Amino acid sequence: MADGHGPDTAPKRGPNQPTSPNAISSAERGVQLDANDVNVVGRKSRDRTLVNLLDQASSEELTRVTVKFAGTKRNYYVFLPQDFDAEKFYWPLVTVHGGGGNGKSHFLANGIRQEINRQGLEAIVISPSFTNKDFQASRFPHLGEGAFLDVVLKDVRSKYQLREKILITGYSRGGQFCHRFALRSPKLVAAAAPCAAGTWTTPDGHLWMEGVGEVTNPQAYLSETSDLSKVPERLHGMFIPRVAAVAGLKAEPGSKSVPFLVMCGTLDTRYDIAKAFANNLKGSGYQVQTHWPRTPHGERSKPEYRLEFEKYPREVVRFFQSVVTQKK
């Protein structure tokens, strides 16, 4: 059982008010958004400062929780909606960060924490910090982080009243985990919104890779390392036996019951493979929505992209809201 958590019943407390030493409060941060905060030299510096401050402010009232997984202490973060009611059941909304990130402050999670209140989605946002020591484990749920997510969800359920199925989203490497988890564990997922993934596994077990295109036999392709010149360097780590064994796993029966929202920026080098994945889902009989903001993969501090990046959390929550409304 996870360690250091208190009672097994949902705590009765006000919305987003920390009750433990692990809580992260605005007072501790000293975050204030006023004219002085962005009074810096140069437009680029001012824009980047504002984005960073908004990221801090949107994660002011997170609660950090530590659990034990595979003999190691690991963290996840919980954000409660405004007007939280311990007697109500909420949707568990899982956000998965990209490579090198964490559950505390990635932009998609920060935006979603704001959007659930703006749009009235009755959800508790759960943001695990996945390993940055083994990127393949956060690409492919079967390689370890799927089991960590199971531990996290079990722990959250011991404290709050949650609905049976989860809503799951992620950006970049988080999008890779998100869509594979949904296709392989459909009994656990109510809806999935993967964004800007660098690789995709289709329901029929084909692999779409940035800079490569469609791979019809992932196991054979990832087992051959003689020529990696056409493969982006950040994907070279996939060419190992344990990834080759899972990269082409087909969708489980029942996965067509999971509706998908697929998003990617039109200026992103991953745009074409995101469209290919969405088209494959549609052709295979899945319920699919798409949204294509005008964004590159990063550079969200630039003024010309900031409003477009805000579409990711807004559209994800809108999509989840439409799904849960139909399930009422």
Image (cartoon, helix red, strand yellow):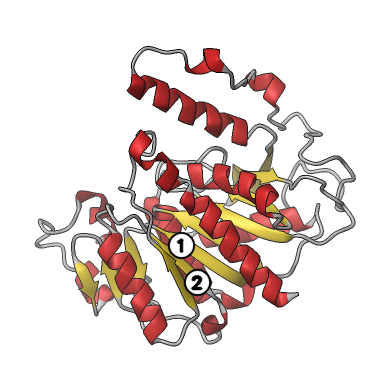
Q: Secondary structure at mark 2?
A: strand
Q: Where is residue 121 shown, x and y percent of the image?
A: 70, 57
Element type where label 1 sits in the image = strand
Within 10 Å of disc 2 (Cα), the crowding (few <14, some 14-19, many 20+) is many
Residue 245 appears in view? no
Q: Position of residue 323 (x, y in %)?
A: 63, 71
Does 110 sit left or right of 138 as displayed?
right
In the picture, the disc for residue 327 is none
Q: Quadrant of the N terminus?
A: bottom right
> Who's the residue at 53% across and 51% down the image?
313
Residue 142, given in percent of the width and then of the height, sits at 47, 66
What amino acid is at disc 2? Phe
Kindly identify the residue that appears in the image at 53 percent across and 67 percent down.
192
289 horizontally vs 70: left or right: left
Q: Quadrant of the C terminus?
A: bottom right
Kindly tell me whether residue 44 is visible in this rendering. Answer: yes
Do the numbered discs 2 and 1 sit on residues whose CB atoms are within 8 Å?
yes
Category of crowding for the residue at label 1, using alpha-carbon neighbours closer than 10 angstroms: few (below 14), some (14–19), many (at least 20): many
Foreground: 305 or 9? 305
Left or right: 135, with 193 as reference point: left
Q: Nearest the camera: 187 or 276?
A: 276
Q: Which amino acid, by three-letter code, is at mark 1?
A: Pro
Earlier sequence position, callout 2 versus callout 1: 1
Whole-percent x, y for residue 320 in the image: 61, 64
Q: Which residue is mark 1?
A: 194
Q: Is residue 282 above or below residue 147?
A: below
Question: Which residue is identified by label 2?
Answer: 260
Q: Whole-Å distance between the Cαs marked 2 and 1? A: 8 Å
User: Which residue is at 75% across, 29% downward?
Assistant: 21
